Amino acid sequence: MRTATWWIRGCGVVIIGGTVLLARPAAAAQQSGGAVTETVSTLHNRDLNGRPIVSGRVVTEHSLSDTEEQVLIETYLPGPQEGRLVLTRRIRRVTTARSYGIDTVEETEELNPGAPREPLRLIQRSLTTMRGSESTGYDIERRVFRRDTNQRFVLVLTETEHRSPR
């Protein structure tokens, strides 16, 4: 099962297995402690009887240091037990400033739909490198790795881009 989320004018659009859910974030909280910020967005819908229900939650944790930025995004969706949300996806993104440019590593973990009681499993890893400067422009290379049938990470996409100076 693939889940996609888009935000359109304050309304969340979540696609779960081909079903489109429109949800307005009814609650959002931010907590900041030092260089760490946590944001919680809760999506509310109505059930068939018109009662309000929590249909999802996205928790984002952002931390920043001198040379590194870390972002953790956890998505919770309704589970098999009514009224309970289950962690279904976790994205970790680490961006590091290096002498030659900026490196970003992003890892995506998801639940196995065939075994929902198992822990999240790493399904994708992407590496993005940005080199250059504002005066010469930037070269950006992105490589995406996904698991094959033998559970090894294989390169599935390579993108390169040049951004000219402004």
Image (cartoon, grey):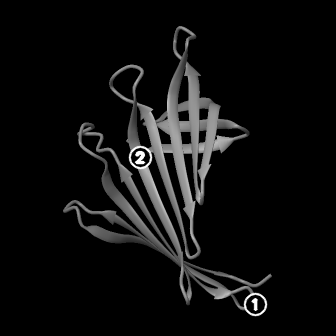
Q: Residue 89: which numbered mark, if any?
A: 2
Image quadrant in which you'd find residue 21 = top right
Residue at the spot of label 1: 135
Q: Amino acid at mark 1?
A: Ser
Location of residue 158 in the rendering, given as x and y in whole percent from the top left corner: 46, 75
Please state which of residues 9 and 81 is positioned toward the viewer in this rendering: 81
Location of residue 92 in the rendering, given as x and y in whole percent from the top left corner: 45, 59
Query: Furthest residue to the left?
Result: 150
Query: Furthest residue to the right?
Result: 166
Where, quadrant-wise, is the N terminus in this rendering? top left
SS at mark 1 in the image: loop
Question: Is 152 positioned to the left or the right of 69 in the image?
Answer: left
Q: Is residue 105 above or below residue 44?
A: below
The span from disc 2 to disc 1 (Cα, nearest Å) is 39 Å
Location of residue 152 in the rendering, given as x and y in whole percent from the top left corner: 24, 67
Query: Furthest residue to the top?
Result: 49
SS at mark 2 in the image: strand
